[in-house]
Image: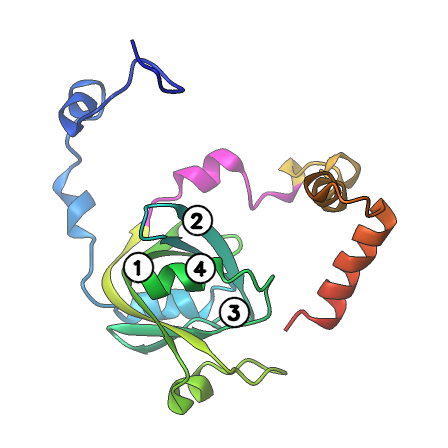
Amino acid sequence: MTDGPFTHLVTSEEELRAGGYPEPPPRAWAKELEALDEHCAAFLARSPLVMLATSSPGGRPTVSPRGGPAGFVRMLDPSRIAWADLTGNRRLDAFRHILANPEVGLLACIPGLRETLRIDGTAYLTRDPAILRAVDVPGRTAELAVGLRVRVAFLQCGKAMIRSRVWEPESWPAAEDLPSPARMLRAARADGTSLEEVEAILDESYTTRLW
C-alpha cells in the first residue's frame, strides 16, 4: 500500500534491469564524449532549437525551449558553448535555477533529423563583452549570455522522433484541431481578460518583442 499517487512502484535500478531493461551494449556507453568534437560543432551550427533542463535547489525541475537562427548556440571551444539571451516571458525560471544550481542538460534539435544532441554541464550567466560579441544574433545586441562548460555530450538515438513522426508534415494535426494558446492562458489567468485581449497580447509580444 502507498499514500502516493501511484502504486506498484519500481524503486531501484536492479528492479529495472530485472524487469525488461537489460544492460545496454558497450557501444551505448562508448558514444559519450567529454568534450565536443567537429561533429558536435557541425550539429550545433545547424540547430535552431534547443531544450534547456534546469532544477531548483529543492529539486523542482523545468524544461524550457531556446530558439534562434541555426547555430545560435555557439561552440566557443571543445569544452564551452554559449548563446545570447533573447526576450522571453521574464519569469527567469531557468536563470534563477542556474544561479542556485548550475548543473543543466541541453537537447539540440535539427528539423528533419531524427537524432538529437545531448549536452550536460555547468551553466553560467555572463556579461563578458567577448562572449556577447561571439553570440550576437542578427538584429539583436546581446546584453547577457548563457555559457555552458561541457561535462558530457552524446548523440541521442532517433527512435522518439520516428515514433512521433514529428518531422513528417502529413502526420501533423489540422490547424483547426490545435489547442488555442489564448484560451489556455485565459483559463489559467481567470482574471476576466477577454479572449480577444489575450490574443492581442500574444500577437503583440510575438510581433514587437520577438528578439
* Colouring convention used in this rendered image of the protein: rainbow
Q: Please identify the quarter of the rendering in which residue 39 is found.
A: bottom left
Q: Is residue 110 visible?
A: no
Q: Are marks 2 and 4 in contact (CB under 8 Å)?
A: yes
- Locate residue 84, reporting x and y percent: 48, 75
- Which one is earlier in the sequence, the residue at label 1 or at label 4? 4
Nearer to us in this view, 58 or 149 = 58
Q: Please identify the quarter of the rendering in which residue 175 is found.
A: top right
Q: Which mark is residue 94?
A: 4
Q: Are marks 1 and 4 in contact (CB under 8 Å)?
A: no
Q: Which mark is residue 62?
A: 2
- Rendered view: 112 above or below 205: above
For mark 4, give the secondary structure. helix
Q: Which mark is residue 101?
A: 1
Callout 3 amino acid: Ala
Residue annotated with mark 3: 70
